[in-house]
Amino acid sequence: MATHKIIIAGCGSMSHTWLEYALQRENAVIAGLVDLHAETALTLAEKFDLEVPVFTDINEAIKNTGANLVFDVTIPAAHPFIVSAALKAGCHVFGEKPMAETVEDAKRLVDCAMETGKSYSVMQNRRYNRQIRAFGELLASGMIGDIGSLHANFFLGPHFGGFREIMDSPLIVDMAIHTFDQARFLLQADPVSVYCHEYNPKGSWYKGNASAVCIFEMNDGSVFTYNGSWCAEGLNTSWESDWRATGSSGSAAWDGTTSLYAEIKNTSNEDSFIYPVERKNYEGSWTAREGHWGCLDEMFASIENGRNAETDCRDNIKSMKMVFGAVESAKKGVKIHF
């Protein structure tokens, strides 16, 4: 008998990866599909050859299937209703980011998870990158000493069309949460303040501000800076950003694609004006699966072992606060304290 009886809420194209993952788990079964448009759910069932009931209401789906886990792959505006209904019905929830469209709604979901005693974890697939994990290991190892600052540069020119090109803050709200969450993971620290300047440069095809510069002060005394644009043609960074960390004994860098490395100062001649450095490549020891599957592996492991997931809602809301704090700072032109 399957340990996990799963309802998938939201049956659009984003649900396919989640469904493919669930189907390869021996201890999981798809119990039902939920979508406001029943035909969308039926199309998904046909595509994956699923003989499961289809519903348009999450409460009815849980009641009629005996599900104990909900995959929330709906649009952000629907997350508060889907997640709270599932938690109150006795289900654990794994959901797409962001938790909600406002921090206040996200806080209510955290409270609901704590009150029901059920797990609510959020998809942050970009944490589950082999080289990001290696970068975190490098910083934690002390190789470059005490970390003073972390910097992420992100410059791409995607022509999405659709909703992103009419959003007020497309880069910060739709993309930067990945980088902000990665920064929290790398530093193992949380923000205490942010100052952000958003802008929309000449030639931009976005209605809202598609570029931003952010300065976060962290609770370990370090500083994280983000310099990004979604309307930069040429000289593209990777989608993982171009990273640099500075420490008391050296610096480390990762361009988002190739292997990361560090340069460690050589103090054999203390009279040096600029110390010579020794380059060291770093591979890391992390061998687990990457992307969505790596994050889902962690989510399942957390409920099977009775612990919080790495991307549990109580942790993930801190990354969400970075996003909305940055947007508020840009609008008001002031530093925002968390």
Image (cartoon, helix red, strand yellow):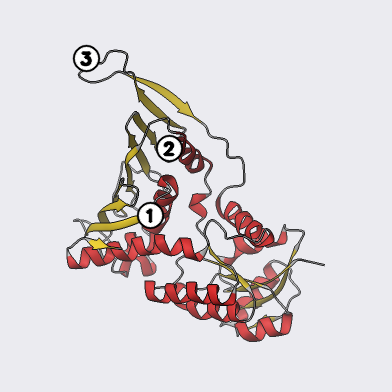
The kind of secondary structure element at disc 2 is: helix
Amino acid found under the numbered disc labelled 2: Leu
Cβ atoms under marks 1 and 3 closer than 8 Å: no
In the rendered image, which quarter is residue 212 located in?
Answer: bottom left
Q: Residues within 10 Å of mark 1 (few under 14, many from 20)?
A: many
Residue 190's label in the rendered image is 1
Which is more N-terminal, label 3 or label 1?
1
Q: Is 26 in front, or is 11?
A: 26
In the rendered image, which quarter is residue 257 located in?
Answer: top left
Give me the C-alpha separation between circle 1 and circle 3: 37 Å
Which is more N-terminal, label 2 or label 3?
2
Residue 168 location (% of width, % of height): 28, 69
Quadrant the C terminus occupies: bottom left
Q: Is residue 279 above or below residue 137?
A: above
Per the image, the residue denoted by label 2 is 139
Amino acid found under the numbered disc labelled 1: Asp
Residue 271's label in the rendered image is 3
